[in-house]
Image (cartoon, coloured by chain):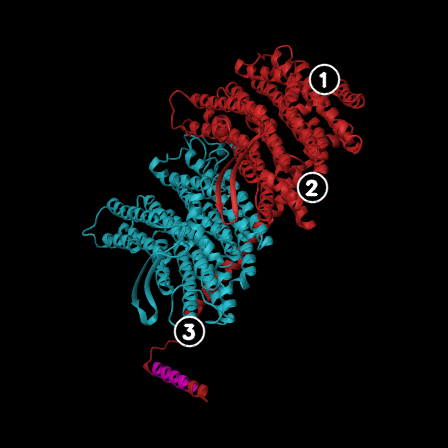
Chain colours: A cyan, B red
Amino acid sequence: MLSLLLLIPFLGAATLLLWPSTPAPGRMRAIAITALALQLVWSLRVLVAFDPSFGGMQLEESVAWVESIGLNYQLGVDGLSLPLVLINAALTLVSAVCTRDISQRPRIYFSLLLVISGAVNGAFLAENLLLFFLFYELELIPLWLLISIWGGADRAYAATKFLIFTAISGVLILGAFLGLALFTGTVDFSLTPIVGERLAMGSQVVLLLALLVGFGIKIPLVPFHTWLPDAHTQASTPVSVLLAGVLLKLGTYGVLRFCLGLFPEAWPLIAPGLAIWAAVSVLYGSLAAIAQRDMKRMVAYSSVGHMGTILLAAAAATPLSLLGAVFQMVSHGLISALLFLLVGIVYRKTGTRDLDVLRGLLNPERGLPFTGSLMILGVMASAGLPGMAGFISEFLVFRGSISAFPLATLLCMVGSGLTAVYFLLLVNRAFFGRLAITPPTADPSADGRLDIRLLGVDLRETLPALGLSLAVVGLGVWPAGLGLLGEATSTALAQLPALVAAAQGGLG
Amino acid sequence: MPLPSQLAWLIPLYGFCGMVLALPWASVWIKRNGPRPAAYLNLLLTLVAVLHGSLILREVLAHGPQHLDVPWFQAADLNLRIGMDLSVTNLAALELVTVMSLACQVFALGYLDKEWSLARFYALVGFFEGAMAGVVLSSNLFMSYFLLEMLTLSTYLLVGFWYAQPLVVTAARDAFLTKRVGDVLLLMALVALSAWAGSLEFQDLYRWIDTAQLAPLPAALLGLGLIAGPMGKCAQFPMHLWLDEAMEGPNPASILRNSAVVTCGALVLLKLMPLLRLSPLAIDVLLVVGSISAIGGALVAIAQVDLKRACSYSTTSYLGLVFLAIALQQPLLALLLLFAHGLAKALLFMSVGSVIATTNCQNLTELGGLASRMPATTTAFLVAAAGLTGLLPLGCFWCFGLMVETFLPEHPLLTAVVLLTNALTAFNLVRLFRQVFLAKPHAKTRRTPEVTWLMALPMVSLAVVVLLSPLVLSRLDPALLHLRALSSGSTLLVLGSSLAGLLAGVVVQLDEFWSRSLFRPLRLLQDLLAYDFYTERIYKGTIVAFVAGLARLISSVDRVFVNGLVNRIGSASLASAETLKFSVSGQMQTYVFTVVAAILLLLGSLVWLKA
């Protein structure tokens, strides 16, 4: 059942690549969208088959592959990975739908999109460390190509930076996984928690730190974040949607699954440091976002801030905070994808994303009123206004973490309060005021030009954004569904340290 | 439970439904026949909310309070519920909110007659009303916070209604950010409370507080966090700036903001009042903030030349008095004052709105002589002024009398604050009345017909309600009946202070050319008050500069150090590759030599390691 989640996108990519002659770009887009819609339908089918009351892995599939090095094809899904699989299916579909007028090599573009989606599914579903690593790396090159072929003016720099950072991340993760085998002397790469008898605490901490830095690059955490703003600014809108909405989640998923899940014993040792790291990351990201002038860069830095709260949740490792982490991953995926879509529309219609230049876009008839309204919704959701997805996620994280790390939690709350500052500045600068898409001058008559008339935004162009907005509001008003989905798993994950300690005590 | 009470959860939804129904017109999706249908739909839904509320009120008066409870989200040890307390006070507040909303929506039909985005206004007011109705009914802190934040959002959108104007842009920004600061602090307290006390139901919290063992520091921080949210909502010093700027928004929204919204904020604080016993510091802060707001607001109001602003500062001032009552654990007093103030202030703003709608001007120095031509508006202003001050036996007279009576024995200083506020407000209102309605007509006020019936009807009806306010208040709660038993001492004090203010207002010279005094110290004082103690400049110089500076610092650190380091590593590796490239000779001998040397080195080290 789960294998189909990999097969559908990979087969779609193969179909595209092997399609005889050269079909029109529209046809290729249709094929890609069909494959992705199928993937979404099948993800929903998995959701139906999923039993939310059970916290462990479900619907497992296992085939021995290269047993001598411990590489098994082993898939499973639980309350942590299923929401992410759904988000992946939905957001890849969104990014395929919002790809229009692609003139350059549409065949490769859409097949890369499908490969990424399949690889991400594989990473979320893998129950074997090496298998996870394979998929983790598999997603890397297509994304590098997507940025460096279809990116902006400075794409070579951004793509190379992305590639180097993420490659280092991969090396660290692989190193940690292999180190595990080396230190324990077995080639068991399954997802069993490492306990003290198998590995001394010192080596555990070293491996854990390597993994943390590896995933921390992907999340990204300060100071390993510099690749993200560049990658986002140079990437095209659909790629940004994919990058922010789905690929960053690989990092946080890795922290929860492989750092907390594999090293429950060593986790409490480094958790206080992680909480501080999270607070630094949140505050740094938010403060840096305030000073940005490029809308996309601002949204990118806000990602740094919001993803930091997931590290806080992981550090606290209470059932509630981990559930909050699941919520935050989903809601950040939806909200940041929405914001990137809207910024993309603004960029397409005005030709700029500069906050010093854009003004008054809410103007009816001549401006982009509907895009502006959705933008207000998006930034308010990101700022954590109740009734939308961001609030309940952050509330769960903070409520779950405050007993464990009061200071770090309060600092993170300050950081999330700062979100309101920079996003309000964005809306106020770009959407309020008098319509203008040229830099302000000293001459008021030139500033108040009335002959600006932006191209109207078609309903089909806003449809993906509208869908995401509805999802953001839906999750904010009715969070119980996702709560049900994630609760059993997050509780099980949170109890892991205690369970391991109890087992140790029982044995000792 | 009878059906209307069972369906009480519908009441906030009426407003939200109104918003959703208005969206097709607000988004200009339906363009035919203009935006009026959205307005009518909202009016109808608000009317339903009023009727539904009054049905429940009748039932509750007959059978006692009810409680409504629906689970919303549950996970681990967290249990978030939608809870509504159908008590007499809550329902009275609900009626205040919904009736105000209804009156303001009818008023807006006239006031915003030619507004092209009328539907958007009604959508926002629907949202506003839904959130307010929910706040006043809610029985737990989580839901209160949830809806207070929605109020923040809708205030932002309503203030920013005319978003193309530069002043509106800054006003909306300041309104949102100021309230947001309060909200984030409240959220911190809320999260902490939720973790410590478990449940967030007010009743459970009251029980928890009796047994809670908290260290002084967390308790003090908790108390400060809890009062920060209402402080922002009620525009108390030092978070009062937004209310003044918010007057850039359309007037019907100002009516709601100055009467109903601030009441919602204060009601949340009222519900939190028993928790404040935890922290003496929070109580002291409340007292100080309340006193400063009461007197400072009244003083600043006097120095304003903008009609709306002169009235809005007195809201800060009256809510300061409410804070005093809450700090002294006098819930009944606070409630009475809230109601009396809410009714009279709404009327005052309707009258002001009528003046602005007719003259298209809100500059006091350009207004004058309206009394003879706008009888309904003039009457409304007079009734509102009488209702706000303690001269005639209307709402606020009884409140002030009762406050003086309660405060005088133990807190003579606070009594002085109450009396001084009353006197200053009386002075301000008389000054406004003289300038707007009495003085000789100016260019903009020569042709001023009375407003249309759509604006006059709610205004006159509300004037009748204000005239009857003592009756309304005492009917609501039997405990208020002893109002009439004010001692002659406190009656005299209230009357005396009002008369003093009135007389001062009558005799003071109001010449627009000399409105700024020639006498230097007086002029400095006037400027200080007119610029609201330079609060905006102080903010700009401190907190705004701090955050902006920090952001710039972090951003440059990010660019120069973090990113610079990455770039330097990159270019260093490139440069080293460039240099290495020249060491390649292309001669076979060199390569063979390198290979042999490497093998020797490797073997040698292995031998050395073995030994």
Q: In this picture, is B283 found above or below A141? A: above
Closest to the observer, B207 or A16: B207
Would you call the spot at circle 3 few (<14 residues within 10 Å), some (14-19), or many (20 or more)? few
User: For the residue marked with disc 1, what is the amino acid?
Assistant: Leu
Q: Looking at the rendering, which quadrant does residue B538 occupy? A: top right
Which chain is indicated by disc 2?
B
The label shown at residue A182 is: 3
Closest to the observer, A190 or A144: A190
SS at badge 2: helix
SS at badge 1: loop
Q: Position of residue A159 (x, y in %)?
A: 39, 57
Q: In this picture, is A52 found above or below A74? A: above
Which chain is indicated by disc 3?
A
Magenta stretch: residue B599 in it?
Answer: yes
Q: Residue at x 70, y 26 (%)?
A: B302
Q: Which residue is mark 2?
A: B277
SS at badge 3: helix
User: For the residue marked with disc 2, what is the amino acid?
Assistant: Arg
Q: Position of residue A343 (x, y in %)?
A: 42, 43
Q: Position of residue A1 (x, y in %)?
A: 29, 54
- Secondary structure character of the magenta stretch overall: helix
Magenta stretch: residue A148 in it?
Answer: no
Which chain is indicated by disc 1?
B
The label shown at residue B392 is: 1
> Image check: B525 left or right of B65?
right
**Which stretch appears magenta?**
B589-604
> Image check: A14 left or right of A393?
left
Q: In this picture, is A323 found above or below B590? A: above
Q: Looking at the rendering, which quadrant does residue B439 occupy? A: top right
